[in-house]
Amino acid sequence: MLAHRRAALWSAGILVVAAATLSLAAIVTTNLSDSLPPTSAPTRSQFPSESDTGVPAGTILSNYSGPCTIDKSGTILDSQRVHCEPLTIAASGITISRSRLGPINMDGEHFSASIVDSEIDAGSFIGPAIGYANISLLTSEVRGGQHSVLCSRNCLIERSLLHDQSLPAGEARHNNAFLSNGGDNIVIRYNTLQCTPPDNAAGGGCSADLSLFGDFEPITNVTIDDNLFRATPGAFCLRLGYDPSKTYGSKTARVVVRNNVFERGPTGQCGTLGPVTSAPSDLDWASNSFDDAATLEPP
């Protein structure tokens, strides 16, 4: 199980936060896939679940009494129960650890946060449970919200569980476990990803477990490594960003997809139409498979 790695991940998490605190430029200018320390991948039976993500057992939580907008750099929230809807990050080098909270909103060039061993439940929040840039998410569970994580740039999502998004009846929301509508420098590795809501009568439903769309800027420098893609009611489990109908959809580049497992599920192909779509021409694809060990050929 992943639980035995918590101490090591705490060290990794603190290192990420320290880097963010000392120099935001280190987050913004360094390609995460090149700079991350080596870690051992979990075996196929050890992908993250509710049992080994989120607040560690035995943690005593206190009710958070601080502001719902954090604007002091280096602020640390540890072992807190936060009732802000959302908690807004407006500073750099913020640490959130061993805490339970609702949605987190972080959308500024100079804002950054590390979220470690925490549980984010965004309920029926319209928008992402966690967004939008300069995010490090480690050994955490994220549920609720329209999307689990929405990232534009500089995001590390590692050893976490993203699932159970919100789709109220009568609302035409599109859901994703992870979504980028354009961005750069994104690493998604050793996670369990699932877009859960079934389609509703209003036209809402899952786009994919993980979707890359070139809506607002090109998708570049994305690493998707050793994740479990759970079967979804959406059309595909993975959308890789190449779509000339999008403003920047033909400029997707430097996407790496390796060592991932795709659950076949009831359709036998992860999504209702297939496992993967929208691959760019320079896609780096290797060692991806279905959960029965059958090789998944490049899209």
Image (cartoon, rainbow, N blue to C red):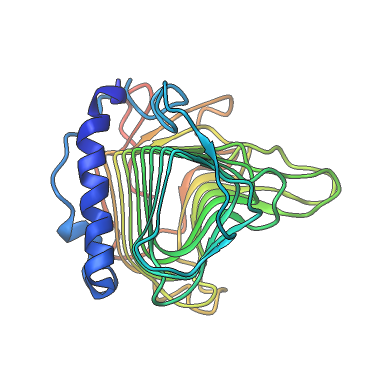
Q: Is residue 135 above or below residue 26?
A: above
Residue at 52% in and 37% down: 62
| Residue extending farthest left | 38
Q: Is residue 164 above or below residue 93?
A: above
- Left or right: 189 as drawn, with respect to 203: left
Pick whichever, 222 or 86, lies toward us.
86
Residue 149 in the image: state x and y as whole percent.
51, 53
Pick whichever, 136 or 217, lies toward us.
136
Residue 83 in the image: state x and y as whole percent.
63, 46
**Quarter of the image where one finds residue 31:** bottom left
**Quarter of the image where one finds residue 174:** bottom right
Residue at 25% in and 38% down: 9
Pick whichever, 41 or 262, lies toward us.
41
Residue 135 in the image: state x and y as whole percent.
39, 59
- Left or right: 294 as drawn, with respect to 41: right
Q: How many marks?
A: 0
Q: Is residue 254 above or below residue 260?
A: below
- Left or right: 86 as drawn, with respect to 183: right
Q: Is residue 217 above or below residue 16?
A: below
Image quadrant holding the N terminus, namely: top left
Residue 166 in the image: state x and y as whole percent.
69, 43
**Quarter of the image where one finds residue 39:** top left
